[in-house]
Amino acid sequence: MKLKTRILVLAVSVLFTIGGIAQTNAQEMETLSKKQQAIVPIAALTAKGDTEHLREALAEGLDAGLTISEIKEILTHLYAYTGFPRSLNALTTFKSVLDKRSEKGITDTEGVEATPMPSDKSALELGTEVQTRLSGHPVEGGIMSFAPAIDYCLKAHLFGDLFGRDNLDEASREIATLSALSALDGTAGQIKSHLRYAANAGLTNGQVWQIVHTLKNKVGTREAWRADQVLSAAFERKYPMPEPIDDIFPRGRISTANYFTGEVFNQRLVSADSNIPCQASNVTFKAGARTRWHVHTGTQILLCTAGRGWYQEKGQSAQALSAGDVVNIRPGVVHWHGAAIDCEFSHVSVIPNPDKNKDTWLEAVSEEDYIEVNNK
């Protein structure tokens, strides 16, 4: 989708939200229950291996009504997606949470254990039935033919031995799976597949979108962004979240200066004095934010640390920037720099001899010119 179109879609979406008429379809209005919402951070933090924050999420899950059996089942289920180490660490953490709650006199509901598997069919037969129902069609060919062993493991073990256990419903398993996959890099293909599985397990589009919001509120923006990218492409109706970044330096406060377009954070890292004739600041641009055209009487050096951005000199083509790039701006050169339209961007701005290095701020970079740069 062209950026002009995407910006128009964003504007329309905002207007609809303000008017209170967005998502009028009844199915879109359905939300996850408190128990289902509690699954999201439990699964995502398990996948991340963040046991410190997992403790709180587990306690909140119990308080929301998840039983001990259900949480154990979630953490066991996730080993197929996150590996034994993450699953075992999470189960160990859960046991310690239960022990501490018990010491405080808190009695949590045990719940029910899974009933025995059907005796009239093998795990492979059961798993094939479950996988076909959730997928909506038989899963065969492609990677399954290339590696028959993984096809067997998926059908017999994942969908038979795990999904076949009846002490956790399929919708909850899909919430856990989507949340865990969103906490891992490189899983867009799997998230896309599980959107179909989630729908066939009974989750509405609105409930799936709520997983994204819960990830953002309870886990992190990057986890929410991963899920949002797949959902936005699949549903073709949501403006994607801008890609977040992890600053290696403090962001500081939002600048109130009038020589920026959009939100820009500034944090002084080094202040010049008689011994250090140089200043350095961490500058973080939200997606779409940039400086005005400006010029320095001295040199400026940009050390790019995170995200994606742009640098352009007057009369020259814009230069794409990413972490590790260095820009040496010569005295007297009119230029601007800032974030890409769909990603945050950070750089360290180094100013030698700041007492003698004066800035002259010029006109803003027009929306038309900025969009043209991002369309290249």
Image: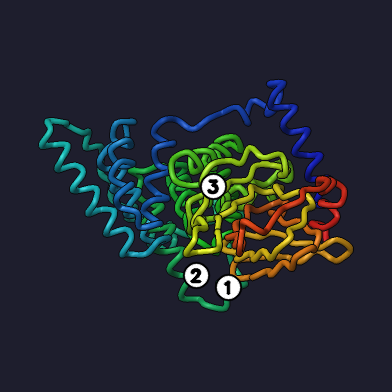
Relative to 257, residue 333 above or below: below
At mark 2, the secondary structure is: helix
How many tags in the picture? 3
First reached walking from the N terminus: tag 3 or tag 1: 1
Which mark's residue is nearer the viewer, 3 or 2?
Answer: 3
At mark 1, the secondary structure is: helix
Residue 33 appears at what percent x and percent y? Answer: 44, 30
Q: Is residue 135 visible?
A: no
Q: Nearer the viewer, residue 250 or 98?
A: 250
Residue ranking furthest to the bottom: 146
Mark 3 surroundings within 10 Å by alpha-carbon count, few (fewer than 14), some (14 through 19), many (20 or more): many
At mark 3, the secondary structure is: helix
Q: Residue at x 55, y 55 (%)?
A: 282
CA gap between label 3 and label 2 equals 30 Å
Which mark's residue is nearer the viewer, 3 or 1?
Answer: 3
Horizontal side of residue 3 vs 168, given as left or right: right
**Amino acid on which the number 1 mark rests in the picture:** Ile
Residue on which disc 2 sits:
151
Mark 1 surroundings within 10 Å by alpha-carbon count, few (fewer than 14), some (14 through 19), many (20 or more): few
Relative to 175, residue 27 above or below: above
Residue on which disc 3 sits:
224
CA gap between label 3 and label 1 equals 28 Å
Mark 2 surroundings within 10 Å by alpha-carbon count, few (fewer than 14), some (14 through 19), many (20 or more): some
Q: Residue at x 41, y 30 (%)?
A: 34
**Marks 1 & 2, CB-CB < 8 Å contact:** yes
Relative to 292, residue 82 above or below: below
**Amino acid on which the number 3 mark rests in the picture:** Ala
Which mark's residue is nearer the viewer, 1 or 2?
Answer: 1
Residue 20 appears at what percent x and percent y? Answer: 68, 21
Label drawn at residue 143: 1
**Amino acid on which the number 2 mark rests in the picture:** Asp
Q: Quadrant of the C terminus?
A: bottom right
